[in-house]
């Protein structure tokens, strides 16, 4: 009897293929949010038979260019999602789905702050209102000047 060896990325716990298949079958581009030790990466990725194609990407380190101290807190996650959303709209993306990877879904987390910024940029993403952080938690009044600057720079 032969033993079937799982894919390398499954063995290393890097990819959940069951979840990935559901996202790919949807046919919509994926908003991929990954959090490193210091920064946050937002990407919009579309499935192609030859391999995934990255439509747009943004790293929270680049927020320094807009006058905001980059990092991986809720505010930088929101702004990163907002910028990624504006760039995705320029590329013609109207709808997307959230791909949080192997991260556990936690209400009001940085992943959902990024999603909120992405949605407020104008891209439609299926979500639940309860998981998004509220404006008070984001301290959105202090982010207004950055949002205006970002809108003027990107559009």
Image: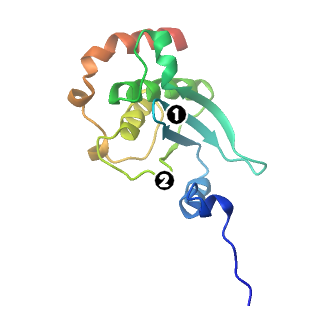
To which quarter of the image does residue 142 belong?
A: top left
Question: Is 88 placed left or right of 3 in the picture?
Answer: left
Please say if 48 is above or below 149: below
User: Residue 86: x percent and y percent?
Assistant: 51, 24
Residue 151 seen in render: no
Please say if 74 is above or below 147: below
- For image coordinates 55% across by 26% down, the residue present is 58
CA gap between label 2 and label 1 equals 15 Å
Q: Of callouts 2 and 1, which one flags the residue occurring earlier in the amino acid sequence?
A: 1
- For image coordinates 70% across by 78% down, the residue present is 4
- For image coordinates 40% across by 40% down, the residue present is 111
- For image coordinates 34% across by 25% down, the residue present is 75
- Say what secondary structure mark 1 lies in: strand
Counting the numbered discs, the total is 2
User: Residue 135: x percent and y percent?
Assistant: 25, 28
Which residue is more in the foreground, 113 or 123?
113
Which residue is more in the foreground, 11 or 28?
11
Question: Is 73 placed left or right of 135 in the picture?
Answer: right
Front position among marks 2 and 1 = 2
Q: Which residue is mark 2?
A: 102
Q: Quadrant of the N terminus?
A: bottom right
User: Residue 9: x percent and y percent?
Assistant: 64, 58
Q: Which residue is mark 1?
A: 42
């Amino acid at each position: 009897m032969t033993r079937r060896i799982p894919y390398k990325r499954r063995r290393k716990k890097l990819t959940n293929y069951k979840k990935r298949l559901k996202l790919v079958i949807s046919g919509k581009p994926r908003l991929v949010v990954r959090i490193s030790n210091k920064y946050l990466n937002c990407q919009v990725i579309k499935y192609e038979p030859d391999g995934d194609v990255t439509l747009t990407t943004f790293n929270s380190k680049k927020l320094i260019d807009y006058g905001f101290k980059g990092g991986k807190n809720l505010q930088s996650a929101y702004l990163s999602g907002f910028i990624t959303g504006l760039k995705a709209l320029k590329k013609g993306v109207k709808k997307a789905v959230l791909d949080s990877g192997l991260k556990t879904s936690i209400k009001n987390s940085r992943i959902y702050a990024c999603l909120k910024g992405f949605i407020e940029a104008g891209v439609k993403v299926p979500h639940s209102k309860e998981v998004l952080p509220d404006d008070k938690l984001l301290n959105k009044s202090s982010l207004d000047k950055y949002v205006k600057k970002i809108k003027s720079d990107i559009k």
